Image (cartoon, rainbow, N blue to C red):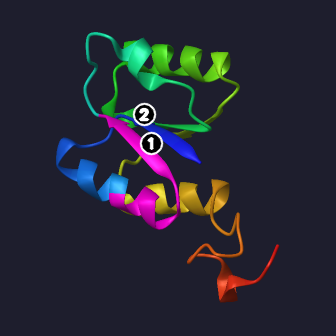
Amino acid sequence: MSIVIVGGNERMERQYKSLCKSYGCRAKVFTKMPADFKKQIGSPDLVILFTSTVSHKMVTCAAEAAQRSNALVARCHSSSSCALRELLELHCGGACAACPHNPKNQPI
């Protein structure tokens, strides 16, 4: 599963990526808006918006990109690693039997 995280803290970027990797997901993290933001988003499966640390313009661009690619959009006010973990549990936790976060690695 590919994930785009919009917002958050710059110093947490590495933690966001490693947490997503532990759930078997590939992640792109955008804490600041680059010049070609619309092109860099691509077509993810899930877009996570940390609303407390992101500009309105970035939210609009990310939401439009998610709509174009039929991606799910998850909004969260907090940009902590615990908040991200909860979102990943909800959207990708236990999605496959080999996932380390699937309780007892049971088939689904």
* Residue 94 to residue 92: above or below: below
In the image, residue 85 sits, relative to residue 37, either above or below, namely below
Q: Quadrant of residue 88?
A: bottom right
**What quarter of the picture does the C terminus occupy?**
bottom right
* Pointer 1 with pointer 2, Cβ within 8 A: yes
* 79 horizontally vs 34: left or right: right
Q: Which residues are magenta?
A: 18-30
Horizontal arrangement in the rendering, residue 95 relative to residue 38 (left or right): right
Q: How many marks?
A: 2
In the current view of this chain or complex, which residue is farthest to the left?
11
Percent x, y of residue 89: 60, 63
For disc 1, the marked residue is 77
Q: Residue at x 34, y 28 (%)?
A: 54
Looking at this rendering, what residue extends furthest in the right direction? 108
Q: Residues within 10 Å of mark 2 (few under 14, many from 20)?
A: some
Reading the image, the residue beneath label 2 is 51
The residue positioned 45% from the left and 24% from the top of the image is 41
Q: Quadrant of residue 107?
A: bottom right
Q: Report the side of 103 relative to 29 (left or right).
A: right
Instruction: Residue at 40% x, 62% y: name it.
Output: 19
Residue 58's x, y, as percent? 39, 18
